[in-house]
Image (spheres, rainbow, N blue to C red):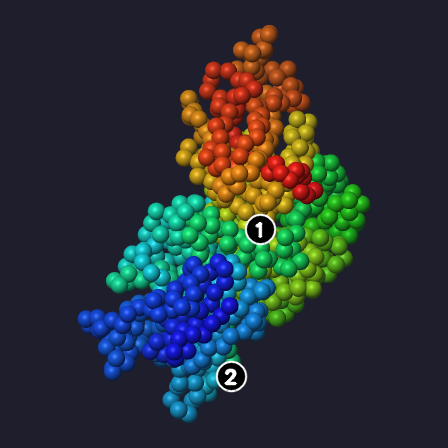
Amino acid sequence: MIIVTGESKNYCLLKNSSLSCLLRINNDQPELLHFGRPVSETDASALTYPPAVGWGESTLYNAEDASSCLDVAPLAWSALGAGDYREGAIELSIDGRQISPDFKFTRFEIMDGVQKMNSTLPQAKGSCETLAVHMTRSLPETEGELELVLYFSLFETALTRRCELRNNSKRTVCVNKIMSSMLDLKGSFIMATFNGGWIAEAHREDIPVGMTAVVNTSTTGFSSNRHNPGYMLYRPGTCESSGEVYGFNLIYSGNHYASSQKSLQGLTRTMQGISPAGFAMPVASGECFETPEAVMTWSEKGFNGMSRMMHRFVNEHIIPRHWQNKKRPVVYNDWEGCMFSFDERKLLSLASKAKKLGCELFVLDDGWFGARNSERAGLGDYTVNRKKLPGGLEGLSAKIKAMDMQFGLWFEPECVNPDSDLYRAHPDWAIHGDSGTDYLGRNQLMLDLRKSEVRDYITENVSRIADSAKLDYIKWDMNRHSTLSGTEAHRYILGLYEVLQSIFGTRPGILLESCSSGGNRFDLGMLCFGAQAWASDNTDPVERLDIQQGLSYLYPQSAMGAHVSESPHSQTLRQPPLTTRENVSFFGDFGLELDLDHLVSVEEKEIKEAIKFYKKHRMTLQFGAFSRLEAYDGSIRWQVKNEKEAIIGLFHKLINAAPGYEWLRTEGFESETQYTVSSRPQGLRVKSFGGLVKHVAPVNINPNGLLIRRADMIYSMPDAQQSFECSGAALNAGIPLHQLYAGTGTGESIRTQGDFGSNIYVITKKEPASGANDN
Ligand code: DGJ
């Protein structure tokens, strides 16, 4: 509901059952009196800041009114040049001279649903109400005026904001900075951001926000693996299950910027939008500039409460409609197993094994076209390599589909190797350095998606192959940072969105997974086109614990590709057990990415069981309400839960000798209800005991001998399994788990795991009886 209230109709309240936002127009400026818990319109005057007198050396917005000092007001929008000396949200110039962007309120406009954008920028969809706050700034009389429209859309789970600059003047105006959103929140916060780099994405970093600004920005041309656009502001003392948290994100894949800074008066200003670095966008007379849409939500139920709001928002308003709440297939991807070296025989052998293990979608990754036998050549070409695939993609696709599997394909459409037919024919389609130097990344240049002929080339080729090879899935990769910056980087992103819309807008059934050297473009912009994104090229599950946990703050499990790969892992040489590789991948879009021809039979059996388990609980794992449980013992614990059941993953990193008790402590179970709890049966590889086997075997056995090696291939020892029944109250209080192995023997009630061990617990509501909820 949106209510305009107050004697002078200068208040506006946006409100639903979980959130509200209260604005007041004062001194012709929009003040943000409140954002967060739902308040009512009768609270409007109580939430209004009492008029203050002038503050020392500050300037007044209205000379007649001593309390019109913008510098101390809680504002929803502001700019330098009119008395607010905090960071401003907009900077404009005309003919190279800055103009003061002092816009004044003119009117409120209320609409049902979203106001559709005119540019190619993606935006949130679905049920909401929108408030448009119109403001103008007149230019010297004959030159007309500029209009700024601030849009506030209230969805059940989040508030989105964006703005539009309409040039109703006769002059061209240059936008040097324009944020999507700005707000002043009450009091002190800590800002948490998600940072890293290639194979080290989304590591959480927390910085208290003081009077020095904390900035989260990307300059790589994309949303980047260095600084994800999403961030949180939370009150000191907040934990996973309690405390006040604001979550922020941006529906944009280019250079982003967010800052938070506290004023002397105790207001924390936070803003987010396109990075202003190098930005100078001319907006001609009669034209309009639209910012990307910013997303913000709030919860007082800690980080978990905020995450659940964001997850619902992403699942219901960002993901393409066709894929909303739709189960994602179990993938087999050939990349880590084969890289560039495969032929049709190898692929069909992998596909038939993948099918037997339970995979539903076979994905052929890089290396299927042109001279693409290494990273050095062929990128940009779309001719199928007939040496590898004599029957072409159509032939391979038909054979895979005949096995009753779906077929998917990798593309990297935005780049070109100089050693490619495309580059030889159209060197001008690549982006060259202005200075005459070409900056190569992974031996490739970027194609210039600002050019319509390049966009057409990509759209035609990808669409043609998608149709002829009857693709069910596309992995859209992009393996380098950009050399474009500022306005040009933004134009590139607009071009990219146009291409994605042309290809996938008319093919909603194709599951698009975006990827960029792993998680280099894991953002809400890409998720508007593709229902999932590859989280990281790092498939070591121990590393994935941090990466997937970092992403989990702002993105749902259903958005994260998570595959079981070979151990030792190519990124770390670490050797975690297969069980842990499976258990971590369960909390995302599960897949396999290893050479199945090298699996031994005990591994095949285990993977088959794992996929069966995943399919049985898939809707809970992909779409259940997610919580990071606090463990107090160094383990990482994830819980997913729906009405009928919950799954908990308990993951260890390094194990200590003489380990203490561990408890299974859940979040959010109904106290009075009875539940059954059961750990997923797991096996222990014989070889993981090394020389210790000789102490339990009746004969003296060589741990490196043939017997042990044979036994290890076909047999695994069952690890302790635990099952019990109890009330939700007991679960929330904490149930003691079977003891961890402490060097004094194994047994039915000893969890024998070692470093990087893990367990999965399935909790099922007893009444009414329930079983599998999906296959
Ligand atoms: C980088 C991706 O992240 C990998 O999964 C794989 O697709 C390679 N590119 C292929 O070149």
What residue type is disc 2 on?
Gly
Identify the image quadrant of residue 140. bottom left
Residue receiving disc 1? 559
Q: Is residue 729 visible?
A: yes
Image location (x, y in percent) of residue 406: 73, 48
What residue type is disc 1 on?
Ala
Q: Is residue 205 visible?
A: no
Residue receiving disc 2? 286
Q: Residue furthest bottom?
A: 142
Q: Secondary structure at mark 2?
A: loop
- Kindly identify the residue that appears in the image at 78 percent across and 43 percent down: 403
Identify which residue, 758 or 403, lies in the foreground.
Answer: 758
Of tags 1 and 2, the one toward the viewer is: 1
Image quarter where the C terminus lies is top right
- Kindly identify the residue that appears in the image at 42 percent across and 25 percent down: 660
Q: Is residue 475 left or right of residue 82?
A: right
Q: Respond yes or no on whether mark 1 lies under 8 Å from ligand 1.
A: no
- Kindly identify the residue that appears in the image at 70 percent across and 61 percent down: 507
Identify the image quadrant of residue 654. top left
Image location (x, y in percent) of residue 271: 40, 64
- Kindly identify the residue that appears in the image at 52 percent across and 21 percent down: 750
Image location (x, y in percent) of residue 145: 43, 85
